[in-house]
Image: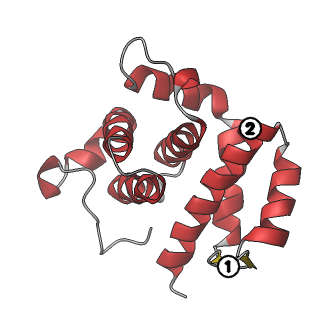
Amino acid sequence: MAKTSERSAARLAAVQALYQMDLSGKGIIDALAEFEAFWIGREIEGITFQPAESEFFRSILSGVVKEQRAIDLKVDAALSSGWPLRRVEAVLRAILRAGAYELMFRKDVPARVVISEYVDVAHGFYGDDEPGLVNAVLDAIGHEVRGGELAKGAGGKSSSKNQGHKN
């Protein structure tokens, strides 16, 4: 499997683990152990969970947990007034947190790739307005924390796939 596919699968697994942690109150150690032992790269009830880049999965999950306060402040600021992150549905909250983490703390991953990948994750869970919300929020955060990078090329379209970059 290509590294890009393994990174995409790691992002999806991280979103799912963050969602589970949010709802169940599980800690990061339990979530990491469960996902790596029972979900990633396995088939469960007829659903195949793709192999994921383990280190990248761990980086996102542990990074979101470690930096959650800073991440939540950025996401809150990017959301519409009167609609704080705590009011956002749990899966969408996990997507926004993971995407914001990568934009804020994983400068080795191009901003356009981060935004595009998490919009794709949102499309996997939602069909309507939510992917657009993910794009808008992550684009706003990206312009704040990586404005120079997003200003270069592609006419300012942050959600376009950047095929030439490692994601």
Compare marks 2 and 1 and give the one earlier in the sequence: 2
**Residue at image point 57% right, 69% down:** 9
Q: Which mark is residue 23?
A: 2
Q: Residues within 10 Å of mark 1 (few under 14, many from 20)?
A: few
* Residue 142: % across, % down: 36, 40
The residue that appears at 75% across and 69% down in the rendered structure is 39
What residue occupies the far top of the structure in this picture?
82
- Judge left or right: residue 26 versus residue 103: right
**Residue farthest to the left, as pictured:** 155
Q: Which residue is mark 1?
A: 46
CA neighbours of label 2 inside 10 A, class few (<14), some (14 to 19), many (20+): few
Please determine whether, in this image, residue 45 is positioned above or below residue 65.
Answer: below
Look at the image and tell me in which quarter the N terminus lies: bottom right
**Residue closer to the observer: 167 or 137:** 137
Left or right position of 104 against 43: left
Q: Which residue is rendered at x = 65% and y = 32% of the image?
A: 68
Q: Is residue 87 above or below residue 89?
A: above
Residue 44 in percent (x, y) is at 74, 75
Q: Amino acid at mark 1?
A: Gly
Left or right, 154 with reference to 131: left
SS class, disc 1: loop
